[in-house]
Image (cartoon, rainbow, N blue to C red):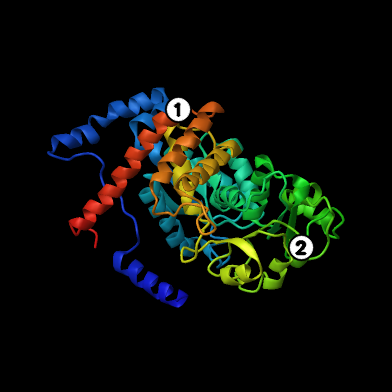
Amino acid sequence: MTERWYRLSVEIHRKYGGKISIIPKVPIKSLEDFSIYYTPGIAEVSRQIYKDPESSFELTSRWNLIGVITDGTRVLGLGNIGPEAAYPVMEGKALLFKYLGGVDAIPLPIRVNTIDEFVSVTKALEPALGGVNLEDIESPKCFHLLERLRRELKIPVWHDDQQGTATATLAGLINALKVVGKKTQNVTIALVGAGASNIYTANILMKYGVKPGNIIMVDSKGILHPERDDIDKMMIENPWKFKYAIETNAERRRGGIREAMKGVDVVIAASRPGPGIIKREWVTEMNKDAVVFALANPVPEIWPWEAKEGGARIVATGRSDFPNQINNSLVFPAVFRGALDVRAYAITDEMLIAAAEEVAKFAEERGISEDYIIPKMTEWEVYAREAAAVAAAASMQKVARVPKSYREEVELARGIIEKNIKIVDLLMREKILE
């Protein structure tokens, strides 16, 4: 089946020459319109922005424009394939931003070799952008970049492999624990994989109330703990992983994935494609009413039916053809919608938790079950509500240039998102898109 999707994707991309384009957002009825949109009228717009650069958010498309920036060093499961090969993935991201969040996004694969070069290029682009989405960057470089750019830019900077996955995971976990009747502060969690996704997931889980000692994280060399042979090297080369080697695993467990999973309530795997990374018998050794998130793509670490046979009550994957898809696409369009609408300076962890709680609440209102713990991407109403939660949290934290209440933003976001969906529907009906 996967080979069929590969073949169709190449055919479609060749047919359309990519997935996105730029179209005007203003009416053009006569030549006089160009005197307004361009010269001579445009000179006064430039003069006003020169006096007040912040007005560029009001007088240009910057307010709704983000760059999807990558160096192509860790693209999907393909690894370091370079910026040109990363372009179709960034373009796909831009498509989802527009359709699901009404956000204009530009694919920007860049050819850089160092962290300093990446930072320099991104900072140079700041006057053109309302936000930055970092994408498909190798670890631990991605951690350095997120920290530096969040500190040095005055627009929201986001790394989807870290923050997007963590937010979607938390949203699904909130409802999974409700279904199985367990409390966040009491559960034990094994994180299989210690890359960008799970390291940020550990951060969000702890901020949400999971006890650090109740988290057991395992990488390719085994369970993280302070006495590991490579702990000094880890401290220098990957201080983010080092932090969790020190703070988590109160039992000081040793071993690999099996030992990390034994007797825990939840497994969140974001490691490498399976199947067979997690064994059915290891699920059997988890606590009763176990929750298994196997998020590797295109093949999860364990097939859902195998996890169920092992005793898991709830299973989630990253795939749309199985129940409970934990997908970043539920998060990033709405988070940026909310952040852009209040012209946020940053995207904070509190904004992410607000987003996760709103996504979970949306699904709960529709009736959560073992096969429905998180909304589907087709339930587009969730994006407006999520954007509103993000905007309200940004306003409360005073990182918004233009604060908005939940009620104000939900109406604004709903209108923007619905308009973009209608535009695509109209273009399809008119056979302009076919």
Please, what is the three-letter code of the amino acid marked with disc 2?
A: Lys
User: Residue 22 location, x and y as percent?
Assistant: 30, 49
Outermost residue toward the left in this view = 30
Image quarter in which the C terminus is found: bottom left
Q: Is residue 20 above or below residue 347?
A: below
Residue on which disc 1 sits: 405
User: Residue 49 location, x and y as percent?
Assistant: 38, 27
Residue at the (32%, 64%) spot, across then down: 17
Please, what is the three-letter code of the amino acid marked with disc 1?
A: Ser
* Mark 2 residue element: loop
Disc number lying in front (2 or 1): 2
User: Residue 27 location, x and y as percent?
Assistant: 19, 39
372 displayed left or right of 101: right
Q: Is residue 430 above or below residue 405?
A: below
Q: Can residue 129 be spotted in the picture?
A: no
Q: Can residue 182 be spotted in the picture?
A: yes
User: Residue 20 location, x and y as percent?
Assistant: 34, 55
Determine which quarter of the picture holds residue 408. Answer: top left
Is disc 2 surrounded by few (<14), some (14 to 19) or many (20+) residues within 10 Å? some
Outermost residue toward the top in this view = 51
Image quarter in which the N terminus is found: bottom left
241 displayed left or right of 141: right
Marks 2/1 in contact by CB < 8 Å: the verdict is no
Residue at the (39%, 39%) spot, across then down: 64
Residue on which disc 2 sits: 262
Q: Is residue 20 above or below residue 59?
A: below
Q: Mark 2 or mark 1: name the one nearer the start of the chain.
A: 2
Residue at the (62%, 67%) spot, across then down: 272
